[in-house]
Image (cartoon, coloured by chain):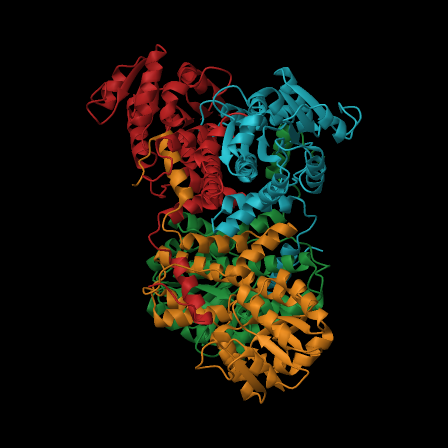
Chain colours: A orange, B green, C cyan, D red
Amino acid sequence: MQLGLIGLGRMGGNMRDRLRAAGHEVVGFDHHPDVTDVASLEELVSKLAAPRVVWTMVPAGQITEDTINQLADLLSEGDVIVDGGNSKFTDDGPRAERLAVKGIGYLDCGVSGGVWGATNGYALMVGGDADNVAKAQPIFDALKPAGPYGFAHAGQVGSGHYSKMIHNGIEYAMMQSYAEGYEILKAAELVDDVPAVIKSWREGSVVKSWLLDLLDRALDEDPELANIRGYAEDTGEGRWTVDEAVRLAVPANAIAASLFARFQSRQEDSPAMKAIAALRNQFGGHAVKR
Amino acid sequence: MQLGLIGLGRMGGNMRDRLRAAGHEVVGFDHHPDVTDVASLEELVSKLAAPRVVWTMVPAGQITEDTINQLADLLSEGDVIVDGGNSKFTDDGPRAERLAVKGIGYLDCGVSGGVWGATNGYALMVGGDADNVAKAQPIFDALKPAGPYGFAHAGQVGSGHYSKMIHNGIEYAMMQSYAEGYEILKAAELVDDVPAVIKSWREGSVVKSWLLDLLDRALDEDPELANIRGYAEDTGEGRWTVDEAVRLAVPANAIAASLFARFQSRQEDSPAMKAIAALRNQFGGHAVKR
Amino acid sequence: MQLGLIGLGRMGGNMRDRLRAAGHEVVGFDHHPDVTDVASLEELVSKLAAPRVVWTMVPAGQITEDTINQLADLLSEGDVIVDGGNSKFTDDGPRAERLAVKGIGYLDCGVSGGVWGATNGYALMVGGDADNVAKAQPIFDALKPAGPYGFAHAGQVGSGHYSKMIHNGIEYAMMQSYAEGYEILKAAELVDDVPAVIKSWREGSVVKSWLLDLLDRALDEDPELANIRGYAEDTGEGRWTVDEAVRLAVPANAIAASLFARFQSRQEDSPAMKAIAALRNQFGGHAVKR
Amino acid sequence: MQLGLIGLGRMGGNMRDRLRAAGHEVVGFDHHPDVTDVASLEELVSKLAAPRVVWTMVPAGQITEDTINQLADLLSEGDVIVDGGNSKFTDDGPRAERLAVKGIGYLDCGVSGGVWGATNGYALMVGGDADNVAKAQPIFDALKPAGPYGFAHAGQVGSGHYSKMIHNGIEYAMMQSYAEGYEILKAAELVDDVPAVIKSWREGSVVKSWLLDLLDRALDEDPELANIRGYAEDTGEGRWTVDEAVRLAVPANAIAASLFARFQSRQEDSPAMKAIAALRNQFGGHAVKR
């Protein structure tokens, strides 16, 4: 089938390739002239026969909002917009309502898989009405991995991005799990070959996972991780997951700790620990570092 | 080759099956007459030609200690004992030294894989001298999964159990990661079919893992986990991992939080939270539950 | 001076007493006829000479919002409303702007001290313009404790409630600090008289505090806290503090853990721990509690 | 009464002053010739009339162990040794038993108060037999603050150091509570004068404490804590508290997080966060810092 795909970066570009390999006709738009198929959103829409499915794969936030607002003016009743970016789930409902006024359908689709999705397929979690899902189903089928997994119609509008948000919250804590274990293994200096131990866990062990495969791969490239600084960005999903835990009164110490560890990793110095050092100096006369 | 295998419970019994299926001659001993091959450790030793390899697969702690002490009296110079239980790594060195006096080799072998190891193979992390490892290598090769993973000679005596300890610490935190995400998904009541979303993650997603497969399996059996109480035991490895983090000055919030969550799950009431309730009552006149 | 005081519950009623004892003329309004001085907000306003200061001490949220909206219709240019409730700081700016249209000043005032404030005085953190602060200063001076502490003009509108929010986040974690220590002391069964040890810390120790005095007081009343369930409510400030930590990328593990402990204390059963128990059963055959 | 006091550093020196001011005869020994009263332990013992009380105030660990062993050879039946250092509670029992063989009594005394104890008095938590406590009671009475607080006979040998250990665990978490709140206040940039807000909490507020007084004092000296690095040592008590939480299955997220925050503060780079950065690079192509 035809798909309009907006955003041809690391994720969108790979998705276009995977969809074309599956026989779909993808009209891609991107601001980078080297990768775009069309010169404008207008041209993109004009190349698609109604009812159209248009997928946005641009950074969450204002860019996604602007893109969807522009599409709203260009599309027609019966068309469907799929937002595959990491939008906040609270944006989905208002967005769907605005589009519904014009008869345009809306699906929010969480997409997991990173740069490996091109070959492995992407895990897709979709929120929205079943009839809109049906219109985009051939695209979902081509993007997802072969086999029984990798696709879920999670529920109403918002539930796709919600699922992806929680997926990423889990991802943060899984990464932190391996990272803490790795650091203890290193610090103990009892295991001669830490990368070999981690590699051994890739089959047979309870902790085997795709993330572990990637950790092994990273250690193959740089056994001491000597060329990497312990500095980690975070994206909205991790923060929103903690916000949701707070809102819903769910104890989520591991996920929150994983998020806080990333915050810590980016601090040059810690105001909190300055206060601790100041206090120790005040009551115990302990020297402070200056 | 021949192997003496002591302890034929859930783990040891499966391991005997897997080893026999691989063509090895296993002489198994267990206190349960239904499963044992021999009536005593003496008989077990007598059935093995020197140099012997004897594997202990009994509960960590005193039982393992006693078993190895008995074996020390029965075995001869050049024999090797492999402890596959979850012994604390600090027990391994003194144990190896005691055995070395008699010329008996010692290997500590962390074994992961649970009840699934019988078919999938076990991940094995081994500590000890290379020549002792070599004597038991055919056994390791039969127990591990096919393929390049699932076995590591981690280093000196103790490093096998150390690796397994950390493995389990990671396992605790990975389980907690999924568990917290699962609870938020449930609490939000935005996703209609939480098990379907979790199932979708089994392929294509960044969080895919064997533990996730098992979570999906549990949800297939009981989609609301209605028949399971939120009560989780812990075993030594999780605690020792936190102790090691403390000893080595490694920040390990996620693993510690995962252990603490298990402690919490087993409390009828919390003395700490009683104190909190008492304090709130004292300063704010907030009512307490009685 | 004159003060209109709306809300004469546990906090407001005590504040009226303290203000009157200091010689101020307080006109109080409450929906409970037993405690109110006037029958309506209209009557309250009519009894005050312009420029008026009116203090709202009602539950944060809609009730506060409604009360202030009603006051906006009754008050005149040059009057000042002080909100002493635990409003969210993000409500203050819009509220101040709405009032400014009518020339009515607005101050947000965080009030700490609980039921003890009546005698000890209250700690007050105020946000808003200096000229509005000046109009209410005699009231602040009467409410605060004698001596140099207990009052701060924190900054612009919102900064008073912001300061109080953080104050409460700290309070959560301080209470958790004592609570965890208390539980370990109890669990160890090495100290014969845990309340005596806690009492000893009230002078001379680094951990002495007013909260500790209250814990000692609670233990005097009920040495085993036998009549108190480990169940703790939370109010908005704790949650908002964690939300702020997340928004501002501040690692706040202790405060977050303190909030999560309260969530935990209110759960009959934990979906997260059900998932953990289910996983342990799946991989290890560990029994689950039903 | 007479007291032999060994160790005249920051703590011991102040204690000698306070005891002498109270009229006691203190014979102090220290390796620094400028501060010592006697040239040797032998001389110290010779200057005391039996039954003697000798207080050790030297660094916990080997130095304390050696000092007490030397005293054991010099003292006589009926004498009492008080260890006021931060010894681990598990050392107390064996130590007391060794001394009991010679008829020498032993008390373990946790001492809190830091450099301020000289004027404010010290909080003392004592473990050991009541008759030994009675022998040293005049010393305890002089060291403790005036008033009803500041001294507890906690129970059997070990319970004094145990109480002090937990005291310090609480202290870690209280300091972390203030520190996290302080950092959020600073990061928000909504409060103009953060030190003024903290100062206001010193009276009337629920979070008032001696530690808060000290934080205010530190901010008076350096309002931005500009001359202090966010680097905090930890001593044994914090670690042992977490070890005890683990041993006793007590959830202690706030205390553990406080300890881990100090570990983090001392890391140049974090191996765990290197692993996280490596993983993000592997799955998402996210750039790493080098």
Residue A245 vertical position relative to residue D26 in the rendered view, above or below? below
Residue A278 vertical position relative to residue C18 in the rendered view, above or below? below
Name the spot of residue D52 as percent of width and height, x first: 34, 16
Q: Along the horizontal axis of the image, is A56 left or right of D182? A: right
Residue closest to the eye, A60 or C246: A60
Q: Residue D123 sits in which quadrant? A: top left
Residue closest to the eye, B257 or D64: B257
Name the spot of residue C289 as percent of width and height, x first: 68, 55
Q: In this view, which residue lies farthest toward the bottom?
A: A23
Task: Identify the residue at image location x=58%, y=33%.
Answer: C109
Name the spot of residue C234 as percent of width and height, x first: 64, 41
Q: Along the horizontal axis of the image, is C187 left or right of D221? A: right
Task: Identify the residue at image location x=60%, y=61%.
Answer: C280
Residue closest to the eye, D109 or A132: A132
Q: Along the horizontal axis of the image, is A102 left or right of C249? A: right
Rendered-image quadrant of the C terminus of chain A: top left
Rendered-image quadrant of the N terminus of chain A: bottom right
Residue closest to the eye, B216 or D265: D265
Total numbered badges shown on the rendered structure: 0
Name the spot of residue D66 as percent of width and height, x first: 29, 32
Q: Along the horizontal axis of the image, is A156 left or right of B262? A: right
**Residue B131 in view here:** yes
Residue B201 vertical position relative to residue D257 in the rendered view, above or below? below
**Residue B203 in view here:** no
